[in-house]
Image (cartoon, grey):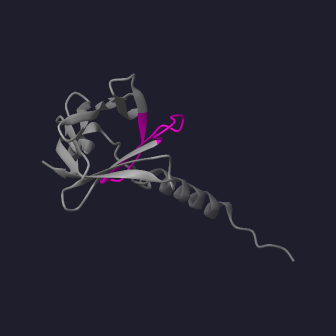
Amino acid sequence: MTRPMIPTRCVLPAVLAIALLAVLAPLPAQEKPTTIANLAWISGTWVVETERSRTEEHWTAAASNALLGMSRTLRGDRMVAFEYLRIVQREDGIYYVAQPGGRPATDFKLTSFDGATAVFENPQHDFPKRILYKKNADGSLTARVDGGEGTRGEDFPFKRM
């Protein structure tokens, strides 16, 4: 059985049409890169109180590619912990920089952001390996530290002061 020959005059226009469609077809929508401005909802003063302690976080407004923060935990009238915090935009991404007790900084790179939850990770760090900030529908904020996805962690259900 022989195949019918397709005339060359039909093939060339078809190939050109397909090539033209491939060139003119719109590119898939690309996600807008996350910037410090996308995380501005973290700004403000936040508090979580339990029977035993009160933890406060204070974050400046986003400016000059950074948010600056500080945290302190009080038990009664005694400060039992404090931490200097930064979220900074660098050439290779956004980083959460933590300095608990004023110790040397540890960087956690932003690995995921869906508009409401920011996930910062440092798999080489002992604990935590992940720090998450979630903007809740009621205006509150939940911070979480854990040992990685699927591990136990600690949640901090902050309310705006």
Q: Check residue 53 for magenta coloring.
A: no
Can residue 27 be seen here?
Answer: no
Nearer to us in this view, 26 or 34: 34
At 52% across and 58% down in the image, what residue appears? 17
Residue 140, percent from left and from top: 21, 55
From this view, report whether residue 100 is shown above or below residue 5: above
Nearer to us in this view, 94 or 30: 94
Query: Most extreme residue toward the bottom, as rendered?
Result: 1
Q: Check residue 110 for magenta coloring.
A: yes
**Residue 116 quadrant:** bottom left
At 26% across and 43% down in the image, what residue appears? 39
Per the rendered image, the range of residues in magenta is: 108-129
Residue 132 in the figure: left or right of residue 66? right
Nearer to us in this view, 109 or 23: 109
Query: Most extreme residue toward the top, as rendered?
Result: 104
Can residue 125 be seen here?
Answer: yes
From this view, report whether residue 32 is shown above or below residue 92: below
Residue 14, percent from left and from top: 58, 61
**Which quadrant of the rendered structure holds the N terminus?**
bottom right
Residue 72, percent from left and from top: 24, 36
**Residue 91 quadrant:** top left
